[in-house]
Amino acid sequence: MKGELISSLKEKNRTKIVFLVMDGLGGLPMGERNLTELEAASTPNLDTLAAKSLCGLLDPVGPGITPGSGPAHFALFGYDPVETLVGRGLLSALGVDFPLTPRDLLMRANFATIDSTGNLVDRRAGRIPSEENERLCRKLTQRVKLTSPEAAGVEVFFRTEKEYRAVVALRGDDLHEELEETDPQKVGVPPHPPRALTPEAKRTEVIVTELLTKVKEALADEPKANMLLLRGYGKYRTFASMEERYGLKALAIANYPMYRGIARLVGMEVYPLTSTLEEEIVALETSYQNYDFFFLHIKPTDSRGEDGDFEGKVKVIEEVDALIPRVLALNPDVLVVTGDHSTPAALKSHSWHPVPALLYAKTCRPDRVTRFGERDCLSGGMGVMPMRHLMALALAHAGRLQKFGA
Amino acid sequence: MKGELISSLKEKNRTKIVFLVMDGLGGLPMGERNLTELEAASTPNLDTLAAKSLCGLLDPVGPGITPGSGPAHFALFGYDPVETLVGRGLLSALGVDFPLTPRDLLMRANFATIDSTGNLVDRRAGRIPSEENERLCRKLTQRVKLTSPEAAGVEVFFRTEKEYRAVVALRGDDLHEELEETDPQKVGVPPHPPRALTPEAKRTEVIVTELLTKVKEALADEPKANMLLLRGYGKYRTFASMEERYGLKALAIANYPMYRGIARLVGMEVYPLTSTLEEEIVALETSYQNYDFFFLHIKPTDSRGEDGDFEGKVKVIEEVDALIPRVLALNPDVLVVTGDHSTPAALKSHSWHPVPALLYAKTCRPDRVTRFGERDCLSGGMGVMPMRHLMALALAHAGRLQKFGA
């Protein structure tokens, strides 16, 4: 309903909107100074910007809910993060450019090591390199043939994602995603069977069981990667694109498969892979004339948070701050700086804490926030707001939403 | 839906959550100092705690809605306060330990005084003591027999609640709760008839009308309590327990029948009656190892508010503050201090004003609130939040909610 309302008011113009998203930006206080990563970072450019911006905190899914990257990004792009829940397999498949069809069931697969009794020894097969993964996927493609009556007409595909991570796709009629994940999330036990969670998924269980048996046979002679663990089952789904919903021609500048996948799912074009922050800014500069909306994804804030590396996360934020003048030099009509969720170094994981955000535009009503930080943003004009409303605010500030009613 | 989402993410662990609920905590400024009851109270322990906590204000049902104690407590426990609306009769029946069945229709009954013309003289029968109430209930149980064809197979029960308050239960097939309340809320007029509000409730109207006629006959020789006023009709309903919804084994430490009733309705165990605040803390201490969640209900804040006794309410808050170190000594993983609704002494009644709240946990992101008061909490990290989200926040801070999506 909310999405349809926004969509019904959309108006095209020539304005540009930039979303600069530091993954896992929100933090928690640590150390003697009792400051969060963002509060501890020296961010003169973001602070100057905050003073001219509408600031606040964004709640990705709802109070207390720790989001995965999928729901958090859907919320950033204005989609209801609960309604749009998709299996991670689908996001990964999109991320590796797998040519999807509506009959596909996608799965995230980890190469893993099992011992002679079938118990897991390493859930990541010693973090094998991507090249090794590619060899294994070719081997599986050659050797794994489904032959049971249940699997008649079902095709199987193996694709490398990164390091030990791969995507497995089943293509056939009436496949279902309601299966138990086979990754038991610990070692010393065998993988779970892919048990059907609904009666309709029973035939899919039989097919996936056969698949795993044949994968195990095919990998029996491998020293490390002798098994696959499956999770994140996801049937192919489509969503109204950002062009349809908002009239925005959108570009994603993002380097991790999942974020590229999400961007494709909402109809963004995806920029070729870059490898540094600086290169991402160059990508923004060189593409600037050709799109209306830019999603610039910065991963290391989240990675440093997951590592528990407070100082490392501070440093990434400071690097981003230093590049802000380059973004401002493009003179975007709306610039949003925020994260998709919090990843406090103190917790070494995603968390439920709201994410600081600023929205800069000539048409914004600045508040009294003069520093970009979690506690400063609490007195901002957005308040603590559901993240999915951010996109409507961005559109409004870009003059891209008509009046509602007379 | 929201409740189901939380439920689907629940994860059990060994953490402890304590909800310390001062009934009617929120207030309004009064007197020369222009402070609310909580602002006027000397609360050194709560202030120190607030400085380390996530603070805010909770809106029990919605902006402008003054809640009864039932909806307010359902919201505290994370249940939608509108969907869970139950007749007060049901809560009272639960509170007096009446053995309910799914065929029961429950009613709150006040003993009242009518004059010879049938007009109400006293809606509370001179606030008769509980012992008198018990005698009257025994008398009614002996004398009131339903004999009309409509009442065939319908049983009636009378139970003392407290002072002039009682519970009447009808047990039979196809009873309906959609009847007009007979308490006209003023004296000098006769009680309302229990008129059916839907066609389906017509037979129940006939039965309740017969019931009231026979109650009047049975009490005709009583000097004070010669009539019953009925309200709060409620059919028996069940709710998913806190164990089912959240994986929490919960204990209620509460002394008023209705709160004990609500606690039972959401599957809490209920501690035996205590009579002082100090005894409630002892109950918490002695039960601490045996439960995951503790609802500690403090009634006098509300009672003093209802009396218009500003200083009395201040005093109760100060007594609670003095006991905070005892609670903290248990080292709860999450401690919430709040109220169920506001009862400003200035209004002598429940009100719609949001309730101050603090949530203390090692994983909370403190804000800049350094004093526990209504206006201080306005700059807290929760903002002004619907009360029903509090439970999800408490679960999250206790590590009891899994990540949503990948």
Image (cartoon, coloured by chain):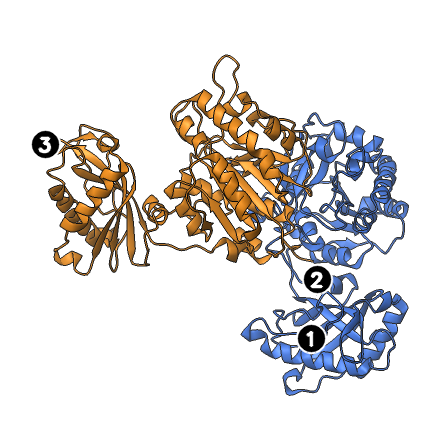
Chain colours: A blue, B orange
Q: Which residue type carries mark 3?
A: Thr
Residue at the spot x=69%, y=82% of the render? A210
Residue at the spot x=15%, y=31% of the render? B119
Indicate left or right for B300 with A107 as reference: left
Q: Which residue type carries mark 1?
A: Arg
Q: Which residue is mark 2?
A: A88
Eye-nearest disc, 1 or 2: 2
Q: Position of residue A309 (x, y in %)?
A: 84, 46
Identify whether A324 is placed above or below A308. above
Q: Position of residue A83 (x, y in %)?
A: 59, 55
Q: Which residue type carries mark 2?
A: Arg
The answer, for residue A153, to whether it is visible in the render is yes
Question: The residue marked by circle 2 belongs to what chain?
Answer: A
In the rendered image, residues at marks 3 and 1 fall on the same chain: no
The residues bearing labels 1 and 2 have C-alpha atoms spaced at a distance of: 17 Å
Q: Residues within 10 Å of mark 2 (few under 14, many from 20)?
A: many
SS for callout 2: helix
Residue at the spot x=37%, y=43% of the render? B257
Out of B88 and B304, give the one closest to the viewer. B304
Q: Residue A171, which numbered label?
A: 1
Out of A234 and B77, give the one closest to the viewer. B77
Residue at the spot x=46%, y=42% of the render? B73
Q: Which residue is mark 3?
A: B117
- The answer to which image quadrant residue A311 occupies is top right
Indicate left or right for A332 with B405 as reference: right
Identify whether A96 is placed above or below A400. below
Q: Residues within 10 Å of mark 1 (few under 14, many from 20)?
A: many
Out of B152 and A195, give the one closest to the viewer. B152
The residues bearing labels 3 and 1 have C-alpha atoms spaced at a distance of: 83 Å
Residues at circles 1 and 2 in contact by the CB criterion of under 8 Å: no
- The answer to which image quadrant residue A167 occupies is bottom right
